[in-house]
Amino acid sequence: MQVPPSVGMDTFPQLLIRNARDWGERPAYREKDLGIWQSWTWLQVFEEVRKLSLGLKSLGCKEGDKVAVVGANRPHLYWVFAAVQALGGVPVPVYADSVAEEIAYVLGHADVRFAVVEDQEQVDKLLDMSEKLPNLEHIIYEEAKGLRDYDPTYLHSYLSVQEAGQALLDNDEKLDGEWIEGLKKGKREDVAVILYTSGTTGRPKGVMLTFNNLLVSVQNANKFDKLDENADTVAYLPMAWVGDHVFSYAQCFTAGYCVNCPEGPETVSIDRKEIAPTYMFAPPRVFEGMLTHIMVRMEDAGKMKKVLFDYFLGYANQVGERILNGEKVSLFERVKYAVGEFCVYGPLKNEMGFSRVRVAYTAGEAIGPEIFKFYRSIGLNLKQLYGQTESSVFITSQPDGQIHADTVGLPMEDVEVKIAESGEVMYRSPGAFLGYYKNDEATKDTKTEDGWVHTGDAGMFLENGHLKIIDRAKDVGKLNDGSMFAPKYIENKLKFFPNIKEAVTFGNEKDYACAFVNIDLIAVGNWAERNNIAYASYQELAAHPEVYKTIQSHVDQVNKDLAAEPMMAGAQIKRFLVLHKELDPDDGELTRTQKVRRNFVADRYAPLIEAFYTGETSKHVVTEVTFEDGRQGTIEATVEIRDMDTYSTKSMSAIGEAAE
């Protein structure tokens, strides 16, 4: 197949032609299927995209049409973006685990005409909502399993659409040239994608990002971290999330590196180990989960191995970050650390799939300082960045050698950041979104006429020029005595402990702070098995007296930590409970990106919050839940509420001096 000469670099389809010409034989995408890695070169990706694009055109897809993309991370679904953009259309990725009503809202709001989905599950959701989606004309599915007896009138297999595109090419050679000419018309100011926000406070909003928004942002990011065609990454986060769109599509097309798609969510850790990516991203909850898994496994390790593990981790905590940052370290310390690398750090990174990682990022919410330091101490170049959907991800990032656990770095190239009088972080950049789709009012509330964007986050610049995010501006409050209450800050301290998966704190305009805690079923379940404690459900384990005792010790430690920080000392946790169920996106308590919907949780569990402040020691509650098969039901429990000791800043200072 002959690749046409360069047609520009203003859109991703145009970059695809560049990639096919310059890196035609290099791997662009891989996918593990039935235990075997399949690979496509840039030349093959170009051919796949061209056939799909012409096939979509034969179905009536044209300039301006919105095309939904619903499914897990699959190369064929990433190629839909380029195929649609080549026709002047706009892809709209949707969270694959959304319930039918959530998908229907996004597709209806975006005026979607075509939907490309992964499998029968997604087809069924769309067919169930068909009456609410009058604009939806065609559904294209990648996996045919279970769909044989469905009405084929408006259903098409992915392969059949590609075959239709190839047939058109075979019958009329001019079509290829016409497709290229149409592709050339793409401009930087065109809308490249509509990404819907997670909707923590209401209905999701459709963020319109132009090609220019994405291209400038990712090209600056590639330069910042020296990313090129030799890099490898693993795509496992939701395709509808802006981070995955940038890391697995936009940066991939601009830098030319290879994106690897795991076989499924349950094989990500194994597949990552096999690929050993050089560039990766994970939200804090993923790093927290991996650390929990490590600690749980080490509890079952032999005594000698556990002693060795604990000793070298303690040593890494002393010198690991200094070595990673290029600071001055004695030869003896380096040799000793090298022994730790051979015995502990290296095998540990290999087990997690980090043996080749050159740069790793975390973002989305604050990561616990202790968790952050753990990974950096064992030699993982983990950094933080700050951004949002509206900024095409990148606002600030941490340069190598300037890594601080409590900051999110310096403004990226071409990005201006300022702190408003209210304490809110605002930015202006070429990556700032065009606007919210069909929501001019929300656009005006978020983006000023001179291009400054309200982030909704409270923050400050430190003396070293780095930005520190305190919390969501609307969430930062005060206790009745005037003490600052920053819920996310406290919650992150709680979530450092492997036994705690999620936490929600309350205290704004109250006399004291309180906390809901979700236990980590894997970590606590493993502990229960080691101690021969039988349990039949999450609810039963969460209510166990020994579990409460353990969580109480964690809350006590957090209070001691808060007491040592004058600004937060007044927000120590006075009362806590272990929630009788896990917070769940299907129950509306979390977003699809696992962020807590605070207002919803506060309303749903209002009786428990009331019990915190009326002095009750237990409360009986009945909670509606959604089961995996979609059925509705209820669970009820009598939840124990415990009181906690709090500490004065003076007493903690005395303890610190005595320790010294």
Image (tube, helix red, strand yellow):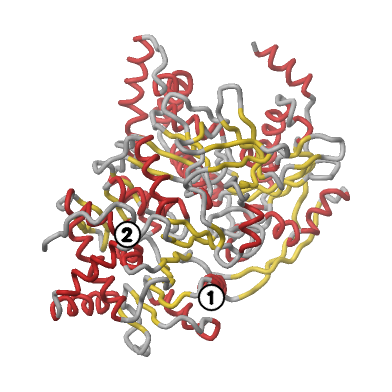
Circle 2 is placed at which residue position? Answer: 263
Q: Is residue 289 visible?
A: no
Q: Earlier in the sequence, mark 2 or mark 1?
A: 1
Name the residue located 59 percent from the left edge and 76 percent from the top edge: 631
Circle 1 is placed at which residue position? Answer: 108
Mark 2 surroundings within 10 Å by alpha-carbon count, few (fewer than 14), some (14 through 19), many (20 or more):
many
- Element type where label 1 sits in the image: helix
Picture coordinates of residue 397 (x, y %)? 48, 35
Left or right, 331 with respect to 436, comes to left
Q: Nearer the viewer, residue 491 or 194?
A: 194
> What type is the residue that disc 2 sits on?
Glu
> What type is the residue that disc 1 sits on?
Gly
Picture coordinates of residue 159 (x, y %)? 25, 75
Q: Determine which of the numbered discs, if any, sits on residue 654 in the image.
A: none
CA separation in Å, label 2 and label 1: 31 Å
Name the residue located 74 percent from the left edge and 25 percent from the top edge: 566
- Element type where label 2 sits in the image: loop
Name the residue located 14 percent from the left edge and 52 percent from the top edge: 25
CB under 8 Å between discs 2 and 1: no
